Image (tube, rainbow, N blue to C red):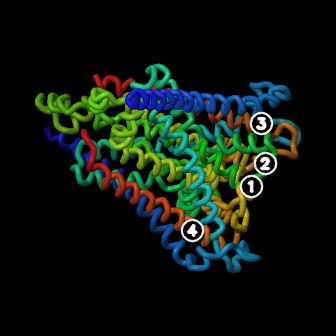
Amino acid sequence: MFKGDLLKKRQIKEFLALFSGRFVLIFINTLAFLIFCGLLLKAKPILHAISISDLLFSSSWHPMKSEFGLFVFIISTLEVTMLAMVIAIPVCLLAAIYLSEYAGRCFREFARLIIDILAGIPSVVYGLCGVLVIVPFVRAIGDFAGISTTGYSLLSGGLVLAVMVIPFIISISVEVLRMVPQPIRECALALGATKWETIKYVVLKKARRGLLAAVVLGVARAFGETMAVLMVVGNVAQLPSSIFDPAYPLPALIANNYGEVMSIPLYDAALMSAALILMFIVAIFSLTAHYTLSRIGETIER
Amino acid sequence: MKSRKLEENIFKFLMAVSLFLVFLALAGIVLVVAMKGLSSLNLSMITQTPKGGYYLGKEGGIANAIIGSLYLIAGATILSLIVSLPVALALQKDYLSRRFADFTRLVLDILWGTPSIVYGAFGFVIMVYFGLRASLLGGIIVLTLLMIPIMSRAMDEAIRLVPFELKEMSYALGTTKIETTLAVVLRQAFPGLCTAVILAFGRGIGDAASILFTAGYTDEIPRSLLDPVASLPLAVFFQAGTPVPEVQARAFAAALILLFIVMIINIIARILGWRFSKNIVR
């Protein structure tokens, strides 16, 4: 009798656990779906006013006159991100290769600590340091090159973003490089390759997918970064003609204007569509990285 | 042979330079914030709320932002822990079909990548829909949304590292899934779970974009969930934007406090992970 009760109790417990497990998973998926739908629903009214090509490719941004061309902002976002990546990728790859291939265990742990701390620094702090250090630095470069600039420019934004994504990319890259099996390296070394040749022809080749995924994740991170970029990039809604010109990326647009949206018709829909574009592009990057990384995980497990 | 060695040495030099740059970045940030921040950091900064004329350089402090940030992060951490731990546990491969698990992971990865400003805008829309003003509650909810994917994915990774043989041993003794999960998996994954919580905590406390519209900003310490609340990242942001030099210096003090909290949390996570990794079987 008592035994049967206990068994029943355990069965009920098990059932409840499995049921609630399913429930939370469905809840999470629904939540994601709701976020997407909410954005879509709020962004939809803008399409009644202007066509989608106007929204994406027109560069006239005059909310008062109901002209909502996001082209300038999209281009600014792309340019800031690309600039950041051009600066960050070589540094990240070189540092990651050193940490994974050359560094001793002790130094690697130490470097991981430093990189973790860097990755944890809030973005406003990066922005603040950018205002104090990078903006005057860029202004000095501009003066030196004979270009008049306030320092609040595309280049400042790119530099700050680069510093922000570097720890992020390095830590994933090191993981990826460490996943390359040791015997492969030994084979190359046994054939008389130097350590660097082994890295160049064998390790990097084997790890290239994973490294690509790391970079893509970095791009995704850089793409949506708001505060740090907002503080140094100048926020002028015109197409930047050089890297010393101010720019106005999408996240900064949303952050600067969302508080006052209620007074102008369709303004909130325009900003929502900006948010939707951001989410969409970042989702594509995340998807790419997710599939690449999970495929690597599978081949390693086998 | 000589040119091969030369190439290796050149690249080694470049690697050393790039690592040096990374270390320099950390040192630079900490030094800049500490030097500028320490000069205007004093006791009244931590213990007082802004007095009249604070934003013109008069006296007062940012106790409202410190307390506000702690309220926000405490609420968000607890809420997201309540959601994330079951999610991560339910994603184990002996719980449900692989396809559904992979799909959920994919969704979580996309949510993880979603920029915080998007969460902020979404949260604002929801709050307008329900007729809420910018409030502590709104801030907590948006931060929770931001932190759930980070926490549950990191927990999921930690739980996946638990050897399956260990679970099989436990099942062989006649336990049910939930019993094995509670007695074996949770204990094995504990350090990883701690790290996951800390990771999400760090992202949450430093995030300004998501609470910009949803938590508001006020000079008071909030008394109820529906009051607007100040926060450290926004204190940094707003004070850095003012033209008064004294107030700008206070932005650095606020940043220093923020940095200090983040680092302390990091160190605690490390100590916890190291202390509890004793009972782990690999």
Comparing marks 3 and 2, which lies closer to the viewer?
A: 2
Image quadrant where residue B91 sits:
top left
Q: How far apart are the two marked residues, 2 and 4, measured between alpha carbons? A: 32 Å
**Dot 4: what SS?**
helix
Q: Are marks 1 and 2 in contact (CB under 8 Å)?
A: yes
Comparing marks 2 and 4, which lies closer to the viewer?
A: 2
Crowd band around label 3 with a 10 angstrom C-alpha radius: few (<14), some (14–19), many (20+): many
In the picture, the disc for residue B226 is 1
In the picture, the disc for residue B252 is 4
Amino acid carrying label 2: it is Leu
Residue located 70% across and 38% down the image: A72
- Considering depth in this image, is A227 or A9 the residue closer to the camera? A9
Left or right: A257 in relation to B238? right
> Residue under circle 2?
B132
Pointer 1 or 2: first along the chain: 2
Q: How far apart are the two marked residues, 1 and 3, measured between alpha carbons? A: 29 Å
Instruction: Give me the chain letter of mark 2.
Output: B
Residue A294 seen by the camera: no
Same chain assignment for discs 1 and 3:
no
Amino acid carrying label 1: it is Leu
**Dot 1: what SS?**
loop
> Residue under circle 3?
A270
Q: Position of residue B144 (x, y in %)?
A: 60, 45
Image quadrant where residue A231 sits:
bottom right
Pointer 4 or 1: first along the chain: 1
Residue located 51% across and 40% down the image: B84
